Image (spheres, rainbow, N blue to C red):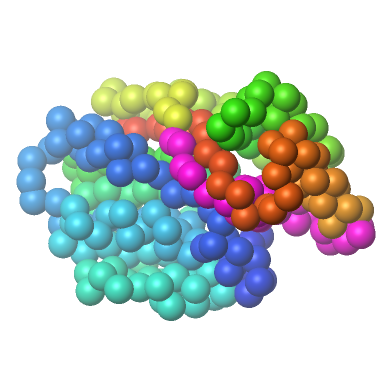
Amino acid sequence: MAYRLFEGKEHAASYWKYRICPSDHLIQQVLDFMKKQKSQPLELAADVGCGSGQGTVLLAKHFASVVGTDVSPAQLEVALQHAKEPNITYQQCVAEELPFADSSVDLMTAMSAFHWFDRPRFLKEAHRVLKPRGCLALLNYTIDMELSYSNCCSQTLNQVCKEFYAALQSYRSPHLGSSTIELYREAYESIPYSDKEWQECVWVRRPMPLSSYMGLVESFSSYQALLRSDMQKAISLSQDICQRLMSIMGVTSAETEVVVGVKYFYLLACKPHQA
């Protein structure tokens, strides 16, 4: 069973505004894996569970055509608002029933989305649509992001961040189990392809205002669940965390720039010639 979240218009807008997409370096690692497995040209990439399209646009310069798919009309509406590349299109569909012909896709990605799918069904669908020697890339990052700020003790700063994440833990969806990374590791082990790669720690660091870091955490499903359950509790928690972080930093504005470190992990797999 797939889970449908992130579908409200406000949440879709915050998703585009705050979510951190993979770095160019991380995308290049995916492409390097592909190039080891198959020859050019790179014709079609499919970004499944594309949300508001931050990751989809990163693929545009590498492929003749890129299709982003998502179940949420609100997310796709935001994606279309920001669509500038002429070789990107978007389609609404579930991840387990994709609008692609058999053996037609060179690269299929799911960036911070695979854990919400009906995972066994999606993996079968990915196998159907990938070309022989086509590649699957499943990327995600952990919630334990790190903050740094000049002339400030990072350990003290991140202890408050850890308290923020811990307060949201009980609102985590049961569909995700106790650890999202374990779901991806299990998928890696279940995929029968011989050419595959698992990477557990790739740091992506981005400067942003403290307010954007707060918005990023508030866009997570666990915070959104708390917001639906007890709006005042969610708002109070967020305001308290923000005030404590500003106090440690010695600043009075949430627009002060910090550096946010996000720990990515990924699974890469190449469909065999005969499958």
Magenta-drawn segment: 204-232
Position of 161 relative to 14 (above/below):
above
Please state, as top left, top right, bottom left or bottom right, where the C terminus lies in the image: top left
Residue plotted at (34% across, 25% down): 197
Closer to the camera, 100 or 263? 263
Residue 28 image-quadrant placement? top left
For the stretch drawn in magenta, what is the main secondary structure?
Answer: helix
| Left/right of residue 173 with respect to residue 255 in the rendered view | right
Residue 249 in sight: yes
Q: Which residue is outermost to the left?
A: 40
Please state the horizontal and vertical placement of residue 88, each as a whole percent of the image.
Answer: 28, 69
User: Of residues 151 and 84, which is closer to you in this image?
Assistant: 151
**Residue 62 among those drawn in magenta:** no
Residue visible at 30% across and 43% down in the picture? 24
Q: Is residue 229 magenta?
A: yes
- Relative placement, left or right, of 241 versus 70 is right
Q: Residue at x 34, y 33 (%)?
A: 268
| 214 displayed left or right of 183 | right
Position of residue 141 relative to residue 19, above or below, is above
Q: Residue at x 61, y 49 (%)?
A: 256
Residue 51 drawn at (x, y percent): 50, 61
Query: Which of 237/149 is in front?
Result: 149
Q: What percent of the width, then of the height, locates residue 106?
A: 22, 50
| Residue 29 image position (x, y, % from top left) | 27, 34
Q: Is residue 103 visible?
A: no
